[in-house]
């Protein structure tokens, strides 16, 4: 016997031997021709977005206070008066400083990245 050949065991029962064609089931489903099925494409619902105030990435429209942008880690602070006002939720960092940090470091606060790197 070739080493790639599988042994044949004629004494094992055939589970499909008792299946009848008139039951409405085929005798051997593995021999049935394969029916082509439509490709099932899952589509996400359209979510209204707006740009992040720091990096411009798409975030959900009207995010709740404290929402963190996954791109730049800026916490949405609706209570900040203007771009130069320190943000309580962002450890006193202003939006103007965060934008500059994002352009330079790729994150709104480089200290956050350092802390994340130390925990890894």
Image (cartoon, rainbow, N blue to C red):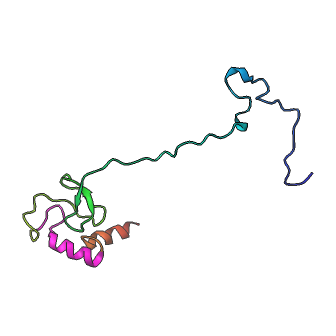
Q: Which residues are magenta?
A: 86-105
Q: Is residue 86 left or right of residue 64?
A: left
Q: Residue at x 23, y 64 (%)?
A: 74
Question: Which image quarter is the C terminus in?
Answer: bottom left
Q: Residue at x 68, y 26 (%)?
A: 25
User: Dividing the picture into quarters, in which one does residue 104 lie?
Assistant: bottom left
Is residue 93 rendered magenta in the image?
yes
Q: Residue at x 70, y 36 (%)?
A: 32
> In the image as oriented, which residue stretches furthest toward the left?
81
Q: In the image shown, does 107 or 114 lie closer to the viewer?
A: 107
| In the image, residue 61 above or below residue 18 | below
Q: Residue at x 20, y 73 (%)?
A: 99
| In the image, residue 23 above or below residue 55 | above
> In the image as oriented, which residue stretches furthest toward the bottom?
104
User: Dividing the picture into quarters, in which one does residue 54 lie?
Assistant: bottom left
| In the image, residue 2 above or below residue 82 | above
Image x and y of residue 6, in percent: 84, 47
Image x and y of residue 73, in percent: 27, 64
Q: In the image shown, does 110 or 104 lie closer to the viewer?
A: 104
Image x and y of residue 38, in percent: 52, 43
Q: Is residue 81 left or right of residue 10?
A: left
Image x and y of residue 112, in percent: 28, 68
Is residue 88 rendered magenta in the image?
yes
Q: In the image shown, does 21 or 57 lie closer to the viewer?
A: 21
| In the image, residue 43 above or below residue 85 | above
Number of marks in picture: 0
């Amino acid at each position: 016997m070739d080493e790639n050949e599988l042994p044949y065991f004629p004494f094992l029962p055939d589970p499909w031997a008792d299946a009848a064609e008139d039951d409405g089931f085929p005798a051997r489903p593995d021999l049935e021709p394969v029916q082509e099925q439509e490709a099932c494409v899952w589509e996400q619902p359209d979510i209204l977005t707006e740009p992040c105030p720091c990096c411009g990435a798409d975030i959900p429209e009207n995010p709740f206070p404290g929402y963190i942008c996954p791109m730049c880690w800026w916490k949405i602070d609706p209570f900040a008066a203007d771009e130069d006002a320190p943000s309580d939720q962002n450890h006193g960092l202003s939006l103007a400083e965060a934008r500059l940090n994002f352009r330079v470091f790729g994150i709104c606060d480089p200290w956050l990245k350092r802390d994340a790197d130390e925990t890894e």
